[in-house]
Image (cartoon, helix red, strand yellow):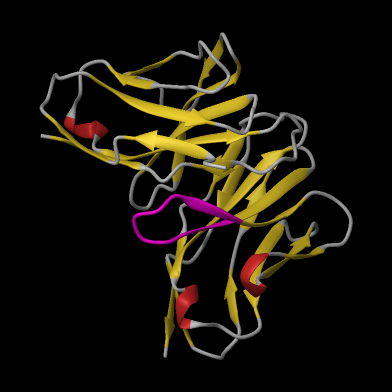
Amino acid sequence: NAGVTQTPKFQVLKTGQSMTLQCAQDMNHEYMSWYRQDPGMGLRLIHYSVGAGITDQGEVPNGYNVSRSTTEDFPLRLLSAAPSQTSVYFCASKGGNSGNTIYFGEGSWLTVV
Amino acid sequence: AQSVAQPEDQVNVAEGNPLTVKCTYSVSGNPYLFWYVQYPNRGLQFLLKYITGDNLVKGSYGFEAEFNKSQTSFHLKKPSALVSDSALYFCAVRDRNTGGFKTIFGAGTRLFVKA
């Protein structure tokens, strides 16, 4: 069981470039989300999805787009990368019951120069 | 509004001694509470959670946490620390009335266990 898989693991972008972080889960989870982790700030929610075709904004959505065309996949798009988006990004998923545990991917380290 | 506070950036303990990592929370309703651990260059791994019932929750790797409603706390504990417990620990809270991904994470506490 692969769980939550993110690619790429590491990426360096130039300011203004665009890219997509891929995320896939094989647990048939309804809920998927993207967090960014910055020193001293914990994890902040960027976008989330409660099912295929449904997405919503989290705490820090600006500069990012998402889509959920299938249950398994939840890509995160950086439209025009900025140095402030240098961070570690985590994809996560959760089953339908509200008390269920969130499962995280291994992370994607992004540097914008 | 939900919030989580981990008042210590870092906790240092000697191997074999008990450890405590503190967490306090604020939610409008009744909480779900979680602890996660993160090792270097890895994702967060689930340790334990409080949903309902017994206030003392036991989790992975010998960790436990006690839900204290009056003090709005959910401190993580282990009776005897190991060097391999050194990692970054996150407390998280979810108001059970909001469901989904309205989960708030603390800033994290780095645990150092010295041999």
Residue projecting furthest to the right: B53
The relative height of residue B96 versus residue A59 in the rendered view (above or below) is below
Instruction: Indicate the quadrant containing the C terminus of chain B: top left, top right, bottom left or bottom right.
Output: bottom left
> In which quadrant of the rendered view does residue B19 lie?
bottom right
Q: Nearer the viewer, residue A58 or B73?
A: A58
User: Could you say which is closer to the camera, residue A14 or residue A84?
Assistant: A14
Where does residue B6 sit, x and y in percent of width and height?
A: 53, 59
Q: Residue at x 78, y 62 (%)?
A: B68
- Residue B39 lies in the magenta-colored region: yes
Q: Say how many tags the image has.
A: 0
Q: Let me know if residue A7 is in the magenta part.
A: no
- Residue A69 in the image: x percent, y percent? 51, 10
Height in image: A9 above or below B112?
above
Residue at 74% across / 34% down in the picture?
A: A98
Q: Is residue A51 above or below residue B88?
A: above
Q: Which residues are magenta?
A: B36-46
- On the image, the x and y values in percent for residue B48 come to 68, 58
Choose top left, top right, bottom left or bottom right for residue A87: top left
State which quarter of the image contains the N terminus of chain B.
Answer: top right
Residue at 37% over, 27% down: A22
Give percent across and percent down for residue A14.
10, 27
Task: Please indicate whether residue B62 sits to the left or right of residue A105 in the image.
Answer: right
Residue at point 29%, 41% (across, down)? A9
Q: Is residue B107 left or right of residue A40?
A: right
Vertical position of residue A32 compared to residue B114: above or below: above
